[in-house]
Image (cartoon, helix red, strand yellow):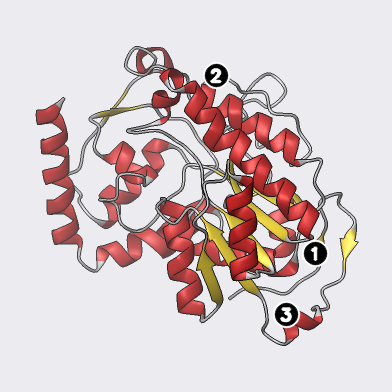
């Protein structure tokens, strides 16, 4: 259940929890961008389930006139921006498609934010937390996480470079909440964008603890934050970090006790990818302040992913085994 505890604005100042007249009357209306994307489609499903009033935008975000036409047509009180370019099959795609990455992840997002500012409409932006990396000041295993106020220190991939630039530029706008999503996870471990799916199909994985976002738990909170009109930056992850091995061990415990995998080093991984990957721990004090009932990453994975999957573990295990075999055959 979503808590209605005290909130903070983007600058850390207290914001009262009293609802505005439109919210108390149930007149909040969402305009959602990213219909064809993963998070955008999940938002539509969630809004429909909640009985919320919403419509998807049809504009390409680089087209200001089309955005204005969407706003005139829908007359939203909140905008959810889950549009963007991550690349297929992964962010390596952005290394050779830099102009498209800029249009989709920088220009379009800033254009929409600028329109929202001029129209006085709150925008929630589903960004990324893959703009930080463990270093001497934030060493792996120290428990010290990057806060919302910390400056991004990872630009190893062009995708992360563009996303960090966008987050910085969005700081100039007063009506924007930027959510730092990391390694998003859902229950469907056959879905290719799911972080668990990505690692479970490989025979070799690295083993580094990371902050992650369990979408079934956190997406409803994002809608509540939009309704509250929170602003600034939010580390949108479950508290704590979990490693690749720990996730696969949960899979073995709950689904397939015969499941095996191997580890390799970051240096070995670098030989099979184009761009380096971000690994980090994000501080979730602000998120926990808003939603004290938020589960830590391990418990959230058990509650929202592995326990539900275990109800049909034989079928799940067979599907995963088939996926691994197909992946190896195609490699």
Left or right: 66 with respect to 93?
right
The 10 Å Cα crowd at callout 3, few under 14, some 14 to 19, many 20 or more, is: some
Q: Earlier in the sequence, mark 3 or mark 1?
A: 1
Q: Is residue 73 above or below residue 199?
A: below
Q: Disc 3, disc 2: CB below 8 Å?
A: no
Q: Can you tell which quarter of the image residue 161 is in?
A: top right
Say which residue appears at 16% left-offset and 43% top-offset. 323
Task: Identify residue for label 2.
Answer: 156
Q: Is residue 100 above or below residue 109?
A: above
Residue 317 appears at what percent x and percent y? 17, 53
Q: Is 213 or 203 nearer to us in this picture?
A: 213
Q: Is residue 248 above or below residue 31?
A: above
Q: Is 15 or 173 nearer to us in this picture?
A: 173
Left or right: 313 with respect to 116?
left
Quarter of the picture containing the C terminus is top left
Q: Secondary structure at mark 2?
A: loop
Task: Identify residue for label 3.
Answer: 23
Q: Earlier in the sequence, mark 2 or mark 1?
A: 1
């Amino acid at each position: 259940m979503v808590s209605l505890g005290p909130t903070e604005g983007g600058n850390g100042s207290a914001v009262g929890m009293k609802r505005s007249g439109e919210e108390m009357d149930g007149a909040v209306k969402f305009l959602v961008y990213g219909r064809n994307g993963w998070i955008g489609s999940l938002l539509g499903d969630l809004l429909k389930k909640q009985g919320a009033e919403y419509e998807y935008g049809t504009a390409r975000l680089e087209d200001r006139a089309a955005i204005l036409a969407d706003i005139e047509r829908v007359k939203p009180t909140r905008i959810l921006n889950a549009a963007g370019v991550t690349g297929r099959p992964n962010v390596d795609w952005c290394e050779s498609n830099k102009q498209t990455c800029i249009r989709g992840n920088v220009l379009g997002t800033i254009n929409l934010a600028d329109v929202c500012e001029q129209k006085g409409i709150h925008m929630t932006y589903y960004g990324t937390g893959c703009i930080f990396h463990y270093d001497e000041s934030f060493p792996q295993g120290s428990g010290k996480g990057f806060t919302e106020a910390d400056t991004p220190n990872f630009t190893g991939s062009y995708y992360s470079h563009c996303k960090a630039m966008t987050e910085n530029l969005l700081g100039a706008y007063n009506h924007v909440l930027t959510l730092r999503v990391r390694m998003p996870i859902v229950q469907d471990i056959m879905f290719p964008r799911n972080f668990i799916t990505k690692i479970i199909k490989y025979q070799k994985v690295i083993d580094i603890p990371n902050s992650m976002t369990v979408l079934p738990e956190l997406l409803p909170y994002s809608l509540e934050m939009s309704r509250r009109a929170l602003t600034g930056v939010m580390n949108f992850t479950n508290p704590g970090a979990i490693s690749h091995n720990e996730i696969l061990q949960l899979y073995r415990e709950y689904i397939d006790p015969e499941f095996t995998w191997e580890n390799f080093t970051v240096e070995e991984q670098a030989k099979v990818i184009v761009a380096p990957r971000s690994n980090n721990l994000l501080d979730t004090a602000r998120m926990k302040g808003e939603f004290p009932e938020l589960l830590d990453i391990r418990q959230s994975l058990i509650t929202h992913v592995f326990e539900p999957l275990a109800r049909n573990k034989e079928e799940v295990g067979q599907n995963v085994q088939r996926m691994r075999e197909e992946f190896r055959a195609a490699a």
